[in-house]
Image (cartoon, coloured by chain):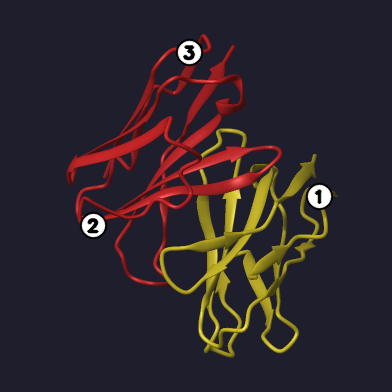
Chain colours: A red, B yellow
Amino acid sequence: DAGVIQSPRHEVTEMGQEVTLRCKPISGHNSLFWYRQTMMRGLELLIYFNNNVPIDDSGMPEDRFSAKMPNASFSTLKIQPSEPRDSAVYFCAGWMGVPGNTIYFGEGSWLTVV
Amino acid sequence: AQTVTQSQPEMSVQEAETVTLSCTYDTSESNYYLFWYKQPPSRQMILVIRQEAYKQQNATENRFSVNFQKAAKSFSLKISDSQLGDTAMYFCAFGQSYQLIWGAGTKLIIKP
């Protein structure tokens, strides 16, 4: 089992540019999360998908952020246009959808917007 | 509001010592799940141990054990015979479903 795979691992971009983060979840996991981690705000849930459908996007900061899950094996988080305050580590995580079960995190995408 | 408090921002102990990380939480729910996750320098969050609130018996996983005090809303993590590889950020979290409430984390440093 390869685990949750995220790309890119690191990205440095200029303010105003579009950023796309990618995630391949673990096969068989019907639920997927995008989290953001910063020193100031800790770990924040951005969006939760179940069976490829966005269930809870209340954590998405603003319209500049969008997430899609076109199929069970792929998801993207897009930021357009990016701003310096978007600099953070973005985690994709998978889950079996059963309360109490382990959430499996990817290694994260470290985004720096200059 | 539901909250998680980890009162120790940073701790350090010598290798082979025992260390306890504290976590308190606040909820009006009676049934939920509690977790400790570890985030080593590689950044990937990994589950260390979990506890179901309706179970009185404290969970254990090898060198890791918890002291769950439901009435006090306390969920501490004890690491026995600490190893250099235990150096990491440790996050306490709880929840009933997909939405977990996360603590701010405790940075644990194991010194050789």
Reply above or below: B73 against A89.
below
Looking at the figure, which quarter contains the N terminus of chain B?
bottom right
Label 1 resides on the chain identified as B
Residue A110 percent coordinates (x, y): 52, 25
Residue A85 percent coordinates (x, y): 61, 26
Give the mark nearer the N terminus: 2 vs 3: 3
In the rendered image, which residue does mark 2 sit on? A30
Do the dots labelled 3 and 1 sit on one chain?
no
Q: Nearer the viewer, mark 2 or mark 3?
A: 3
Reply above or below: B91 against A22.
below
Residue B38 percent coordinates (x, y): 59, 50
Q: In this image, B60 relative to A90: left or right?
A: right
In the rendered image, which residue does mark 3 sit on? A16
Inspect the image, locate mark 1, and give the three-letter code of the amino acid beneath it: Pro
Reply above or below: A44 against B47.
above
Label 3 resides on the chain identified as A
User: How many dots with numbers?
Assistant: 3
